[in-house]
Image (cartoon, grey):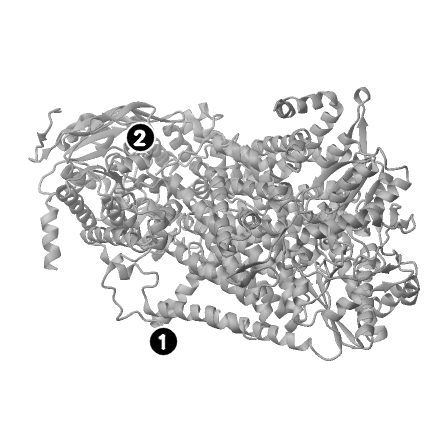
Amino acid sequence: MFYREAGQYNTTYEQDLQAFPIKQDKIGIAIWLVLAYLFVPFFGIPGLEYGFAMNAIMIPVLIFTITTIGLNILVGFTGQISLGTGAFMGVGAYACYKLTSYFPDTNIIILILASGFVSAIVGALFGLPSLRIKGFYLVVATLAAQFFLEWCFIRVGWLYNYNPSGAIEVPQREVLGWIVTGASAEPMTRYLVVLSILVFLAIIAGNLTRGRIGRSWMMIRDMDIAAELIGVRPLTAKLSAFAVSSYFIGVSGALMVFMWLGAAEVESFDVNHSFLYLFMVILGGLGSITGSFMGAAFIWTFPIILKELGKSWFGINATVMENVSLVAIGVMIVVILIAEPHGMARLWQIVKQKLRIWPFPH
Amino acid sequence: MTDFLYSIFVGPFADMIALPDFLMQVLWEGFVAGVLYALIALGFVLIFKASGVFNFAQGIMVVFSGLTLVGLYELGVPAFMALIITLGVMYVLAFSVERFVLRKLVNQPDIILFMATIGLTNILIGLGQWIFGGETKTMITEQLWLPTGSSVWEPNGGLVIFQHIDIAATVIAVLMIVGLGFFFSYTKVGRALRAVADDHQASLSVGISLNQIWVIVWFAAGIVALVTGIMWGARSDVSFSLQIIALKALPVLVLGGFTSIPGAIVGGLIIGIGEKIFEIYWGPLFGSGVEGWFAYVIALIFLLFRPQGLFGDKIIERV
Amino acid sequence: MSTAETFITPDGRTIGAVMMEMKNITLRFGGVVAIQDISFDIREGEIRAIIGPNGAGKSSMLNVINGFYHPQEGEVWFRGAKRPSMKPYQIAKQGIARTFQNIALFKGMTTVENVMTGRQLMMKKSFLWQMLRVGPAMTEEVEHRRRCEEIIDFLEIQHIRKEPVGSLPYGLQKRVELARALAMEPKLLLLDEPMAGMNVEEKEDMSRFILDVNDQYGTTIALIEHDMSVVMDLADRVVCLDYGKMLADGTPSEVQKNQAVIDAYLGVEH
Amino acid sequence: MLKKLIVGVLGAALVTGASYETAKAEDTLYVPSLSYRTGPFAGAGVQIANGFADYFAMLNARDGGIGGAKIIMEECETAYNAQKGVECYEATKGKGALVYNPYSTGITLQLIPKAPVDEIPILSMGYGLSAAAKGETFPWTFTYPASYWSQMSSILKYIDANGGVKGKKIGFIYLDVGYGKEPIPLLEALGPKMGFEVAYFPVGVKEMQAQSAQWLNVRKERPDWMVMWGFGAMNASAIKEAAKIRYPMDKFIGNWWAAADVDLRPVGESGKGYIGANFSGIGTDFPAVQDMIKHVVDAGNSKADPADVGGVLYNRGMFNAVIVAEAIAAAQNATGKKSITGADMRVGLETFDLSAARLGELGLAGFTAPIKGDCADHEGAGSVFMQQWNGSSWDQISDPIAPMTDEVGPLLTDAAAQYVSDKPEWKTQSCN
Amino acid sequence: MLDNGQKDETLLQVSNIEVIYNHVILVLKGVSLSVPKGGITALLGGNGAGKSTTLKAISNLLLSERGDVTKGTIEYRGKKVAGLSPAELVRRGVIQVMEGRHCFGHLTVEENLLTGAYTRKISRAALKESLELVYEYFPRLRERRKSLAGYTSGGEQQMVAIGRALMSTPETVLLDEPSMGLAPQLVEEIFTIVKDLNEKEGVSFLLAEQNTNVALRFAHYGYILESGRVVMDGPAADLRENPDVKEFYLGMSDEGRKSFRDVRSYRRRKRWLS
């Protein structure tokens, strides 16, 4: 009824190759964009205090969406599991920190986008073993990256400018007269910057995954041997996946520190965070960009909602709810893997299917 | 430059020779750590062999079992009663995992099962903290009749200290490995376990129930986890931070191969001793703290040359 | 067997010069010998069948041809030159495509995406263009999409174009796999049991496709097949393997009459 | 299923929104508590949070709040995680938060730049950034009663008084994060001056409970004294390992986060002789603590295990609450308002004066050395005393030891200058 | 030996079953057959015809391969098989010897045999006795009892697989492709043993086999499967004489059959017409 594609025909391949060939989807995306750009910056989330809505929900969710898209490129699209996400975010963050101290006058957004290249290189480097090893063995290799990098963040003083606190602290920077980083930056400014970078990167991710390169990743994922026999160079495919994935993750790491946390030490990049991002990918949906949005939003907001629910409805204290949300997320991971390995993105598709034929059951 | 080469290639060895008793101590500490790594790896191997599941939750199972034991004791349950109840809890865990996770995920790609065990890890962390609290707990060493105290050996005026609990841990680990070996080699169920490890379909065809076997191996891994939890807890208390140390079992597995029990033991000892030696004698060159990644990096390098591990079978890919 | 540049089969078909020659190939896995000292050739434009019981080393042979396995001994000659040790993707570049015994489609993708993977080697536009997906990248994508749609049309699988291949029936999956191989525009097409598990009607369809490919595109085909009637009808020449050893090589009728083949494979009363 | 979920989410959003409204009622003082009762440092976090909460509950019950205004204390769970810390900060700051006690160096570092913008002061009581003691550079941050550097200097003074520090080798074992590394610059500056040598033994967060390598190194280096900057599960493990290598316990000093009952109880008898620095009194003998037991613990309004009341960290949590309460009172005096703001609170903290007499009035005579802060001094020249573990509890073994202000002061000034060096917009204040 | 006229008790009755893999792929499209007590019944057909699937449907091993019997019933001794675990079926006397010699490679030959008795709760002596019986039929296995099954030859592995099944004292053995990949003499040897077991021990066999020739020489009754359907059945002797069987399965005579080459034009035309 509401979601029918009847009467919509694509007459050229160009039309068929669009990101959202169906009209309703186009409208849906437009609505989301309008909400994101015109409503949220001014009104936040209705019912929530503005600063809280921005700083505790919207900004982190957008940043983690970039992380999740990045990790999804690796795990969901290329089938290479990584537990080093936290550390690769750290690479982006530390790289950006160093760049800001070397180029204090350069536009900070350019520096953030540039810092992704550093983590892309590091990511590709640690992706090298994937050419010889796969599956669980690769998990161990990425853990090696995680722990080695964590060690570097602590031990290599140069990375944090020999700061006595051992942490990186975000300097204040302006772009076109707007303060975008530092504590004085308005939440709205930071939100819009993060949102724009996310939109930009999401489009790139969508384009890449639908084209030749994305296909080579998926070929490796679905059947690496067949892929090789058809002519995919595992070296190029895997390393490009690692590099692109790490680029996204690195940018998100830089954003996390510069646009959100304001200061960070190694704890913000530890292995527990790597798990968290993996959960976002799994729950959202392996191999789905849309799912990455859902997964990041869900995993980040779920404990917050649960905490509030527990407190205001049942009078349960935050500690218990913290544990409840750990258990609940664990259970959801297992349930999702059993019921629908493609996660919330697939559930959403099913809902759309249902809408397409609504109100008829079949 | 020569100084640098010296500090890498000569200095550490000179140190070793200069203080032989200290070297002994380092080796012993490494050995004990290795035994504990091997025990965690053993739990992994049991499950991997029988069900092909790469059980990421083995580490948290160690913490969870130790925590349950101590938690029950703190609630006033007598020590050995608590031990028995903890065994029961580990059985319930094994049963639930088989019933609600493995059975539903039969024939899914390995990677899905692996991620499910990460989910399981989250559940166990949450439950453990919820029920027993997040505080560090002291292992009830004496109440379980485990030895405390230490013995000293003084070769030529040197000093090597052996903690009794470490000796006990080694003995118990050896007993357990021998016991498991016996169980696997000479009992009907043990034979069935090995059969399942070799070939699921064929095991089914001769009437071995996979579900039953999975419960048994997860329970066996649970027992191994409990023993590890007790021993590690006795050395350095029970807290959730142990879970991260337990991840060290992964490089151990890489070295030993995922399916080999002797591999787990040898791998554990190599990593345990290797990282201590490296940390003590070469660590200062890197600014120390290299223990955190040494095992993983060794495993990574090793993987590049021998992906199937020391004892694993060579993998032949087919299309 | 004639070594002349071309020769005429009993069916009256003209077969070209030697395209690929396997010389004394031996392949071992650990202690197990999969292929032992086998030599045969494949000529331009022919349909070459490899038969033999299960475990005879047929699939291993295909894997040697497309470079997935590297034989311990022996040489592979391709178009008059000895082929050096190559990676599978390099061999794919030379124009060798294949299908697999246990369907090796990319299960997470749709039919059309699977077919598009066959064009992978021909798509050249750089990473940057891919990222933007406009201009040359889009033109390229559309161009190759058009070629793929032709193949989809040729193999009559238009109706499942946007279906994820994982949920397709067996017979259709086999066809999609063939489409993917064809999309590579191969010079030599290797088919590993293309008709296993099909009923007569499906086999007829598949036979037709194989013959059409051979005919229209002039593609050389090497196929493994169990159904002797199919082999006898389609193949120009047949090589029969047994337990890694060569039993016979010749025209279908020659092979069919060979006593060793009958004993080991076709089976006849003792 | 999906419908239920949507309804649930919307409901939660509404409720969340609603709960912000309630906090802004008349004449209340809103004090958020960023606690961690879960996560790797829950053991310490629980005790601190309980002491902090119980003192305010006692004030509400006994005195009806402070200056006639009720205190609303709200806990927010951070699990010692910087990301959750931001979430908690954002969730509470809009409710009129007076002061933040982050209890994590990581979160403190994140909040320091935010404080002047949001005009809510930070009280990092004996943790966080040492340089924040400089009130001129950090108008919004307070480290009463002492910074880490002051503490380290007091410890050095203690060592000096017990056998001299000159020519000695001091082993410094520390948690390898920002917190543990804080005193290193001070040690490096004072070492040459005072003639001692330092050997460093970092302990990674992951290896907190597997320290045998570090202690083997201790055995190799043979330091005369060991000083520990540890936290959580690290402490007990370190003391156990020290006992294993038979390091003399009375030469092993833990800082004030490494000298609690929770740290030593697992060690028990073998930790006998271990020395810890502290600035908050131990035991339940103080009238104020008795009041807490009477009004809160016995009334069943405390989350604390009665056995933990009077413990080191419980009392420290309480002391934190005392400082907050005293600063609120000072702010009320200064502004004449019952209900104050964060900016008022800052004034209260800058005029903070906890004299011996005032301590007596509070029922905390002898609990700690007097602390007096001002515009320039945000650490209050707090002294620490030493306590020793007797196998089952702590005994105070020294009088309060004042820090080496002359030595530490210039270093703090330098560090503060370095902090703002790449922050051109940083707002400082002038104290003359 | 079963005489042709003699109608024995039916052990296994498969009625019109349909099997679907992964919820989509239809493999069996209505297969019916019955296995009499004391007989050797052969299930013939090419690769992928559905022979193995039929056997797995009977022994309930399908579930572990995501296959599902969606229609029809399978009854053993009058009781429905659906819902019984493979272990339960073994206890009731139905055991499958899987295609491709699924031996436990890391177990010795003797251990392999012992796993066959997993479902039996018996004394050591009885176990020993069963082992002896197997060794009697397969003297080669006695020689190799201590070696790892993975290191034995293909023929020996097939013997291990059959011997292992015997250890469960089965009433019916479902034997899948015993000749696969074996040299002709070995095939002969194994079939002879099967026949012996059938005659002396009274074990009934349901035999899936591609090698029609050998199978029909040893079996009493045969079913021919093509694309998931039974296309022909009858006593083995009759089938051997059947001209179609001769042509398609025994590879003899080639007359009167439409060639796959001619299919092109014919199918094309059909497509245009329809």
Q: In the rendered image of this protein, does residue D329 appear above or below residue E185? A: below
Q: In the rendered image of this protein, does residue C59 appear above or below residue D100? A: above
Describe residue A277's horizontal placement relative to residue D55 as left or right: left
**Residue D294: image x %, image y %?**
87, 68
* Residue A150 visible: yes
User: Where residue C182 is drawn, which disc sits there?
Assistant: none
* Residue D66 visible: no
Amino acid at the residue labelled 2: Val
**Which residue is located at x 45 percent, y 57 percent?**
A285
Is residue C255 or residue A60 the one in the foreground?
A60
The N terminus of chain C, quarter of image: top left
Task: Chain letter for mark 1, please.
Answer: A
Tag 2–tag 1 contact (CB < 8 Å):
no
Question: On the image, which quarter does residue C78 sit in?
Answer: top left
Helix, strand or loop at disc 1?
loop
Looking at the image, the residue that sits furthest to the left is C12
For label 1, the crowd category at 10 Å Cα-Cα, with few meaning under 14, some 14 to 19 and many 20 or more, is: few
Mark 2 sits on what residue? E187
